[in-house]
Image (cartoon, grey):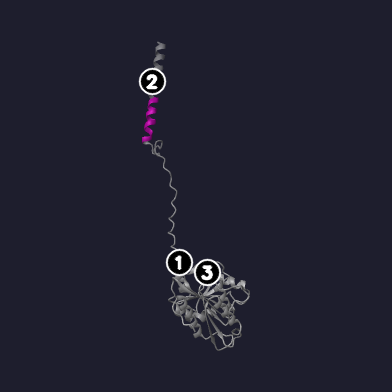
Amino acid sequence: MTGNRSSSHTGSATRIVLLVTAAAAVLLLLLPLFSPSAPSTRNAPTVRKRAPQKPPLPPPTPQPTAEEKRKKLFSQHADPAGNTHIACLHDAGQTYEFYAPPGAPLQQTPILYAFHPGGNGRAMIQQFAPAASRLGWVIAASNNSRNGPWKDIFKAQDAVLRDTEARLDLHPARRFAAGFSGGARSSLALAFRYPGKISGVLAMGAGWPVNTNLKPGPNPLDVSILIGNADSNINYDIPRTEKKLRAARVNQITTVYPGGHVQPPQQMIEASCDWLNNCALGRPAPHR
């Protein structure tokens, strides 16, 4: 009897353990359904966090066209008594005075390069502004070219020529040079150094670029010389200049005015500018 009783108790205990185990398994399965915690992500797709987006870049500022730049330049330097000063783009130590009269064309712009014996570009602007305004020329007058070593003069000329060619759309034929005394010699030197780029020269009070090996090139060149009847240069310098120019088949005229080594009358300056402009345009030019 005792053995059967033990066996019965052991079977009951085993059944109880199995029931408890089964109940626990069911509870484990049902527990997620009633749990307040976050749902299982065992089979959920992985969600990547997005990096914060940067604000969009502003659209690029439109760059002005070459013509818009020229228009702005002309408007800033339209008054011969106002702001005319410009520093060269490639060399800020080289400067010039620039005047663009109202009505000067933005394309195919005629230009006058002016040289003062003392490097006073402002004075050259004042002197040639009336003619430039009538003819639609712009003026570029160097502040660095002055009486002295030719290497310094050539450096100043190169700087102004390079800068104006970079900034402007220049007329292929209507490019002129002018100056008084040493500035006259510099003007002829520029024409001889750049044959084909300078079509006409107004030389006042002096002529040939002495102490150089320069001479006219094969391209057409017109030269107007204005000289005072009491100027010492009328006796040797001007006759020698005339002879050399004509030997090189340069179209040249000389006009004499009363006075010594002084500036010519304004009306003669303007008449010479008209003559040079007409020659460049190919119109019949009066030969005085």
Callout 2: helix, strand or loop?
helix
The local crowd at label 1, few if under 14, some if 14 to 19, many if 20 or more residues have their Cα within 10 Å, is: some
Which residue matches tag 1?
66
| Residue 2 at x, y percent in the picture | 41, 11
Give the residue displayed 39% in from the left and 17% down from the top: 11
Q: What residue sits right under mark 2 in the picture?
A: 15
Sequence-earlier tag: 1 or 2: 2
Q: Magenta segment range?
A: 20-33
Circle 3: element type: helix
Would you say 37 lies left or right of 243 here? left
Where is residue 238? Give x, y as percent: 58, 82
Residue 244 found in image quarter? bottom right
Say which amino acid is labelled 2.
Answer: Arg
Q: Is residue 7 visible?
A: yes
The answer to whether the residues at label 3 and label 1 have Cβ atoms under 8 Å apart is no
- The image quadrant of residue 226 is bottom right
Task: Report x, y in % for residue 12.
Answer: 38, 19
Give whichever of 182, 219 is nearer the camera: 219
